[in-house]
Image (cartoon, rainbow, N blue to C red):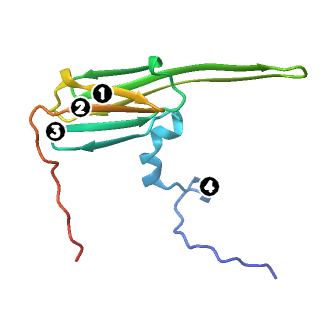
Amino acid sequence: MSERHIMPWRRRGFLPAFFDLDIENFFDNFYDLFNPQTIKIDMRETEKEYIIEADLPGYDKNNIEIHHEGNMLTISGKQDEIVEEKHENYIHRERRRGSFSRTIPLPENIDADKIKASYNNGVLRLVLPKITPSKPQGRKIEIE
């Protein structure tokens, strides 16, 4: 007699099981699948400014470029690092190369002439002042 295992029931479509995809997550992460160099950012809003923080560990600030055009902000960078250690019985070499580019759509009320950037301990921080201060919009929605 064959052994049966408990498996979750799934409605079968026209394709075999190995073609089953989690469509929601697939399209949400599609860009990350084919570009592992994508940087992760945090963006928050205060009354007077927007603040963007991006993790860029290992990058030299001279290899990071920031461009603002229209309502788009592009952060890009290159990395080309070679580490070599020589000792009596061995030679150790490692290479790390890569590049990234991330374009972020921005609201229209940004004062482009006053954008400031700083880079400290692998974190790029951008402060984008608003032309006219405003409170962040939104409200808490109660669950019934």
Q: Residue at x 28, y 44 (%)?
A: 44
Name the secondary structure under disc 3.
loop
Callout 1 touching callout 2 (CB < 8 Å): yes
Residue 117 on image: x %, y %? 32, 26
Disc 4 to disc 2, how far (Cα)?
46 Å
Label 3 packing within 10 angstroms: few (<14), some (14-19), many (20+): some
The image's mark for residue 128 is 2
Task: Quickly name the residue at label 1.
Answer: 73
Lower position in the chain sequence, tag 4 or tag 2: 4
Residue 78 on image: x %, y %? 50, 20
Q: Amino acid at mark 2?
A: Leu
Residue 103 on image: x %, y %? 35, 30
Q: Quadrant of the C terminus?
A: bottom left
Task: Quickly name the residue at label 3.
Answer: 48
Disc 4 to disc 3, how far (Cα)?
51 Å
Quadrant for residue 127, please give it.
top left
Label 4 packing within 10 angstroms: few (<14), some (14-19), many (20+): few
Describe residue 34's horizontal placement relative to residue 95 as left or right: left
Name the secondary structure under disc 4.
helix
Task: Quickly name the residue at label 4.
Answer: 18
Label 2 packing within 10 angstroms: few (<14), some (14-19), many (20+): many
Q: Quadrant of the N terminus?
A: bottom right
Lower position in the chain sequence, tag 1 or tag 4: 4
Residue 17 on image: x %, y %? 60, 59
Numbered-mark total: 4
Q: Residue at x 23, y 43 (%)?
A: 45
